[in-house]
Image: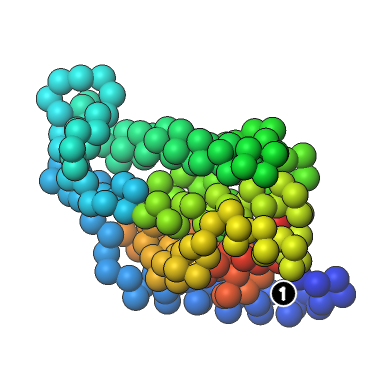
Amino acid sequence: MVTLPRRTAKSAGLALLRENAGWVAASLAALPNVAPIQDGASIAIEGIPHLIRHAPHGRTPILRGNALHVPGDPAEMPQRVANFLRGHAKIRLAARAVAKAASIGLAPCRVTVRDTRSRWGSCSAQGALMFCWRLVMAPPFVQDYVVAHEVAHLRHLDHGAAFWALADILSPHRREAVSWLQANGLALLRVGRPAGAAPTRSAPTGSAKAARAPWLSAQNP
Ligand SMILES: [Zn+2]
């Protein structure tokens, strides 16, 4: 979805959409192919490469050392790995969010994870936090900043000076995290998706800049 200032001509909106579609496609084409999720492949968890192994027995994937053992039909492995990481993300991101919020005397009313394509996190006016589960593949300092950003919105539902001051108190990693996501964010979005598949549903919100750092967009409190 493209968000436009009021009174912008519809044709300008369509032009913006086309520009962004081109930018996203070019960015994805420039990336090395992300290896499919299969036995012997590597996947980052908390920023650390983990070997994916097919497990002949068992019911659920198990993390052991730097390997993720995945039972079941190999054809279902991508979905099983995604489900596992999603559950892992929920636990890790929710724990971090609750702890950070508690440090400033607040509590999110809810923390959910989703497979978003246009933002890494969000905070509703009611205090519900949402994060993209794919963040669990990123290094902890990246998760730390994105969580801090959304927790800071529990107090300031804008991107004013007070908001940034609080976000920087909650996490000292803003600069490195933004750089990391600009360099690696699209690759995270591609993991487990067919080669060449663009994050089609709503990749950029408004501008190419927003697509690179969507959670910094002013439209995305
Ligand atoms: Zn924000």
Q: Is residue 189 left or right of residue 127?
A: left
Q: Quadrant of the N terminus?
A: bottom right
Look at the image and name its color scheme.
rainbow
Residue 101 position, x and y percent, is: 63, 42
The foreground one among 17 and 214 is 214
Report x, y in % for residue 119.
57, 56
Mark 1, residues whose alpha carbon is within 10 Å: few (<14), some, or many (≥20)?
Answer: some
Query: Helix, strand, or loop for circle 1?
Result: helix
Q: Going by the image, does 212 lie left or right of 152?
A: left
32, above or below 153, in the image: below
Q: Is 20 on the left-hand or right-hand side of 4?
A: left
Q: Residue 206 lies in what quarter of the image?
A: bottom right
- Residue 176 in sight in this render: yes
Would you place residue 18 above or below residue 82 in this image?
below
Is residue 36 among the parts visible in the rendering? no
Kindly identify the residue that appears in the image at 34 percent across and 75 percent down.
Answer: 30
> For the point 51% across and 41% down, which residue is it?
96
Q: Quadrant of residue 215?
A: bottom right
Looking at the picture, tell me which residue is in the foreground, 25 or 113.
113
Name the residue located 26 percent from the left edge and 19 percent from the top edge: 59
Relative to 79, residue 115 above or below: below
Question: Could you tell me the amino acid type at mark 1?
Answer: Gly
Give the x, y percent position of residue 191: 34, 53
> Dividing the image into 4 quarters, which one contains the C terminus?
bottom right
Q: Position of residue 44 (x, y in %)?
A: 29, 51
Q: From this viewpoint, which residue is outermost toward the right?
A: 7
CB of residue at label 1: within 8 Å of ligand 1? no
Q: In the picture, residue 104 is in which quadrant?
A: top right
Residue drawn at x 62%, y 74% is 207
The residue identified by callout 1 is 13
Q: Is residue 91 left or right of residue 127?
A: left
